[in-house]
Image (cartoon, grey):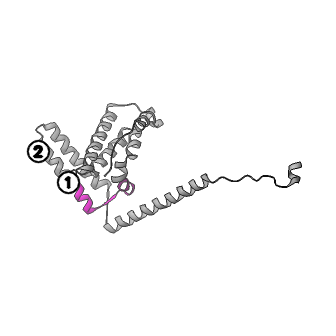
Amino acid sequence: MGRATLSASDKDKIMTEGSSEDDKTPLTPLRVLYLALGFFFFGLGAVGAFLPVLPTTPFLLLASFFFTKGSPRFEKWFTSTKLYKDYLASYLKHRSMTRKRKFYLLGLATVMMVISMVLVPRIEVRIFLLTMIIFMHHYFVRYIKTISPEEEQALILQDKAELLLLEEKLALQEMYASESVPVESPTSSDDLTS
């Protein structure tokens, strides 16, 4: 399961490394809301990684959406987390899932949110959860392509092959970088005298 912890250096990077777009765009109340929702759903996704009754992927998809809208800096941070790489990277790369996986993820997330709606007496929270359920279903239907299990396996094999090629390329680059090219020194006495 993925672990979402930040070291002090990661926190410093997040606070100091911003893209030029992030520096030029003012922090509006809407962007603050997007970031708050991004962290909220990231937290739910992190909890879902450890609790089998709470789905991870739908919440991380929502976190990805809100971080993308909120800030390039936090989107970059989010995509570098282990949680993102373990649960979302391949989905977002190919924008596809099998029908079975879609039904499972949406069903589980919807059931958990409906249970929360029933247990929470506040109407504002119920409206918020209902809105999130609608948004989640809309996102899965509209933006995530449905593929067959065979297509999913082909994509997994393709990703593994790309990863192996990348690892091989990096290993070759490291090998060439670590090799030192010997400098030829003069060996004959004629070369020494001239």
Residue 156 within the segment the image draws in magenta? no
Judge from the rendering whether residue 113 lies leftward or rightward of residue 172; answer left or right.
left
Q: Which residue is mark 1?
A: 108
Quarter of the rendering containing residue 30:
top left
Judge from the rendering whether residue 29 lies leftward or rightward of residue 174; answer left or right.
left
Q: Across the whole image, how many numbered discs are drawn on residues?
A: 2
Q: Residues within 10 Å of mark 2 (few under 14, many from 20)?
A: few
> Dot 1 lies on which element?
helix
Q: Residues within 10 Å of mark 1 (few under 14, many from 20)?
A: some
Question: Is 143 in front, or is 36?
Answer: 36
Q: Which residues are magenta?
A: 89-108
Amino acid at the residue labelled 1: Leu
At a point 40% along the width and 36% down the height, the residue shown is: 8
At a point 65% along the width and 52% down the height, the residue shown is: 180
What is the x, y in percent for residue 35?
32, 37
Instruction: Judge whether 182 appears above or below 11 on screen.
Output: below
Amino acid at the residue labelled 2: Val
